[in-house]
Amino acid sequence: MKMKYMKGENNSRRMRDDDDPLSGVANLFDIAMVFALGLMVMLLMYIGMPEILTETDMTIVKNPGQQNMEVIVKSGGEIKKLDLMNETEQMEVVGVIGTIYETKGGGMMYSPESGGGT
């Protein structure tokens, strides 16, 4: 009779250690995080912007020339969205410094004013 008791005790201890309901779920969070990170990297590669993951500086202009235009600037590890105003500011012109001409090839040429500006 005593052997039966010891055998049962041994089985119950084994069940407690092996049948823990969370033992199989313990690493699912880690697997999900690795999968999400891999998915994010693949998405950035797909849209052609792997520079977001590096330290290179970049500027993105969304909807250029439209009312809802946005400018996003990445400098080092910091990403900022610039606030654009849809207002016109008037200033007084006090002098001409020079003139910029466009060439046939699409280049530009700067010609300073002969007086050196005022």
Image: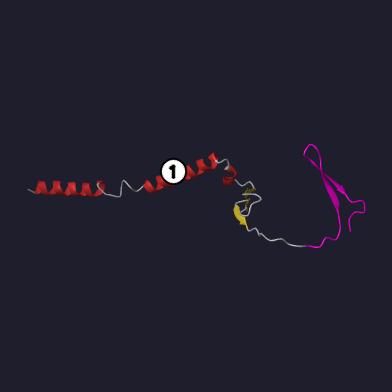
Q: Is residue 81 left or right of residue 114?
A: left
Q: Is residue 63 left or right of residue 114?
A: left
Outermost left residue: 1
Question: Per the image, is 108 magenta?
Answer: yes
Residue at 87% of width from left, 47% of height from top? Answer: 111
Q: Looking at the picture, how far across and down is residue 76, in whole percent?
A: 63, 51
Question: Per the image, is 66 magenta?
Answer: no
Disc 1 marks which residue? 35
Between 55 and 85, the one nearer to me in the picture: 85
**Mark 1 element type:** helix
Residue at 25% of width from left, 46% of height from top? Answer: 18
Outermost top residue: 105
Which segment did they paint magenta? Answer: 91-118
Q: Looking at the picture, how far across and down is residue 57, in whole percent?
A: 64, 48
Q: Is residue 83 left or right of residue 11?
A: right
Q: Is residue 62 left or right of residue 30?
A: right
**Residue count near mark 1 (Cα–Cα under 10 Å), binned few <14, some 14–19, many ≥20:** few
Residue at 21% of width from left, 49% of height from top? Answer: 13
Q: Looking at the picture, how far across and down is residue 64, in whole percent?
A: 65, 49
104 vs 77: above or below: above
Q: The C terminus appears in which quarter of the rendering?
A: bottom right
